[in-house]
Image (cartoon, grey):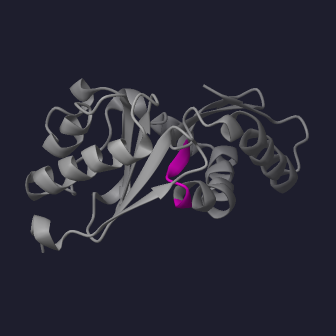
Amino acid sequence: MKLDAKDLLIRTLPTPNPFALKFVLNAAFKEDGKATFNTPEECEDLPLVHDLFTVDGVRQVHLFQNTLTVTHSGDLENEDLDAAISSVIRSRFAVHNPSFGEQPKAMRPHADMAATPELRAIEEILDRTIRPGLQADGGDVEVHSFENNELQIVYQGACGGCPSAAAGTLDAIQGILRNELQNDDLIVTPV
């Protein structure tokens, strides 16, 4: 059931990234999976997401279930950004389709990687140990590639450009994967 704009409850939350805000709604932004957009051209068929890029400084929009995370340049104060984003959500939610398709192919991990047992193990470990915390903070991580014991990852949402993602989070991901896979040679690098 689609909610009217007057029935939408929007809660804005800070994230560990000073250049990202998380918006939690009492309705779905994305019914299945997640999506990250870095340009308005990637989301031309999604008016709500496309129009978010008209707000000064918006660099990335990440949708996951009832959460939308906006990464920004810092050009606007958080209060002004909150008001502008909330306004777009309220005005465009009626035409938003939360069951839209997959992300653009360039933004998805390689589909053939899931075939290897080691990569399936990596994805299971990330799902169980890392992703819940990142998603709670309005972010996420995707596997970009894995070969020769080097796992390349892509940070999404609030994790993209976050100072702690480059150091602490990356070290935690690498440590957990090394421990669980019993592979001290595994290296995790961001793309």
Q: Position of residue 140 (x, y in %)?
A: 53, 48
**Quarter of the image where one finds residue 143:** top right
155 vs 99: above or below: above
Q: Residue at x 36, y 28 (%)?
A: 57
Taking 156 as reference, is 75 left or right?
left
Residue at 78% across / 31% down in the picture? Answer: 149
Q: Is any part of residue 96 visible from this angle?
A: no
Count of numbered labels shown in the rendering: 0
**Looking at the image, which residue is at 34% across and 49% down?**
82
Left or right: where 191 falls relative to 68: right
Q: Residue furthest right?
A: 184
Q: Quadrant of the C terminus?
A: top right
Q: Nearer the viewer, residue 57 or 178?
A: 57
Residue 1 x %, y %: 12, 75
Q: Is residue 25 left or right of residue 41?
A: right
Q: Is residue 46 magenta?
A: no
Write the residue at 24% across / 28% down. Answer: 40
Q: Quadrant of residue 170?
A: top right
- Viewer-proximal residue, 117 or 35? 35
- On the question of residue 155 being in view, the answer is yes
- Which percent across, then down, holds residue 146? 66, 32
Tell me the magenta residue range: 136-141
Which sits in the foreground, 53 or 112?
53
Q: Position of residue 163 (x, y in %)?
A: 67, 35
Frontmost residue, 98 versus 122: 98
